[in-house]
Amino acid sequence: MPDAALDFAGNDYLGLALEPRVREAAADGARRFGAGATASHLVSGHLSVHETLEQKLAEWLGRERALVFSTGYMANLGVIQALADRSTALFQDRLNHASLLDGAALAGARSRRFHHRDTADLERLLARSEAALKLVISDGVFSMDGDVADVTELAAVARRHEGLLMIDDAHGIGVLGDTGGGCTEGTSPTEVPLLVGTFGKALGTGGAFVAGDASLIDHIAQFARSYVYTTAQPPAVTAATLEALKIVRDEPERRARLADNIALFRREAASLDLPLSDATTPIQPLTLGDEARTLRWAARLDACGVAVGAIRPPTVPDGQARLRITLSARHARADIERLLEGLARCRQEDTPCATA
Ligand SMILES: *Cc1c(COP(=O)(O)O)cnc(C)c1O
């Protein structure tokens, strides 16, 4: 992607990665706490800035305790490995993020995959299970499709079968809900006992958390190997995340701007007869099916100065290659119009871009 390209591929949904206050908080965090944490959390790397972020997250999300991990990938590996073993039954949505499947592999537990967003299929699988621990796991907002899990229904099904529900809301945190609390905003810890979110998307920084009841989170802090055996997150990143969290909570107008941009894109894309999905989140896939065509469209957009994701198997199922277009509060109307103009040219296939 050329530097000057308009970015419709990243996950900076609220424009916080480039926000001056967040960058300044990073610099200030480094000045106050040092360039690195110098040790793991359980030794001496757990600094006051980590503690403050965990407390603010727990309070925001209505959970007793939150635990900060260095990345979302590590959070998912650690949470699943800390709770599951070979005798645990895991139930995962077919389209769950790779890190959730890798966590199951690390725990040595078998994942049963239910049809995408199909709680009846999940219920059938749960009813057949005799396992002592049944862990039900779903993405909140699905990363390649932009659709949202039915958390209330998942919670009800999990509860009927004494399953423990874990939601990975990497793409929902900061974006969905009145306070940006994500797709589980307003749920209780009884409904969603394990809530994972990441900072590398809407919060614009990096890292992740798991939130829930204190006893459950304490257990994870002691047994998640990706938490115990790694150096704590650099404090600059944690300090930047604290500032980003404050902005997420204090500036709902960013979510309103994002919603306007999504609506504008969907309205105009529909009038161009593009293969829009039903997703109403910032992730707007255009499923073209054919890999070569997907690459051709992405290259043509690139020549128009617009960067989008060209997603192919195995990241998505065979025959479902797509452009993954992401919208942000930071996009101006003119940016979205440039994207649409590029897409209109793609639609006419071989028309060269006038501005190339
Ligand atoms: C991005 C993502 C992750 C991984 O988070 P990182 O902080 O990038 O490691 C986990 N789960 C989902 C659903 C994601 O989209």
Image (spheres, rainbow, N blue to C red):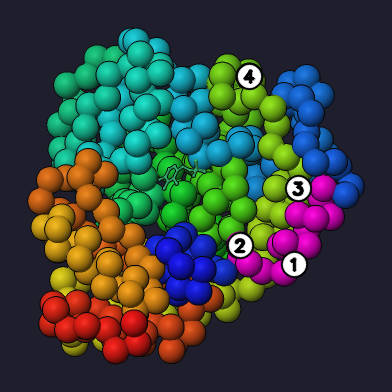
Residue designated by label 1: 21
Answer with mark 2 or mark 4, whichever residue precedes in sequence: 2
- Find numbered disc 3 in the image and state the secondary structure of the residue it sits on: helix
285 up-or-down from 303: above or below: above
Expressed as whole percent of the image width and height from the top left, the position of residue 9 reads 40, 63
Tell me, yes or no, whether the two marked residues, 3 and 4, touch with CB atoms within 8 Å: no
Front residue of 189 and 329: 329
Marks 1 and 3 in Cβ contact (< 8 Å): no
Q: Earlier in the sequence, mark 3 or mark 4?
A: 4
- Give, as a three-letter code, the residue at label 2: Ala
Tag shown at residue 229 = 4
Identity of the residue drawn at 28% across and 34% down = 92
Q: Which residue is mark 3?
A: 236
Residue 112 is inside the magenta segment: no
Q: Residues within 10 Å of mark 1 (few under 14, many from 20)?
A: some
Query: Foreground residue, 84 or 71?
Result: 71
Residue 36: assigned label: none
Instruction: Kindly state the secondary structure of the residue where label 2 is placed.
Output: loop
Residue range of the region highlighted in magenta in the rendering: 16-30
Judge from the rendering whether residue 347 lies leftward or rightward of residue 91; answer left or right: left
Mark 4 and mark 1 residues within 8 Å of each other at the beta carbon: no
Between residues 132 and 68, which one lies in front from this camera angle? 68
Spatial CA span between label 3 and label 4: 20 Å
Disc 2/disc 4 C-alpha distance (Å): 28 Å
Looking at numbered disc 4 in the image, what kind of residue is underneath it? Tyr
Q: Position of residue 211 (x, y in %)?
A: 57, 39
Amino acid type indicated by mark 1: Arg
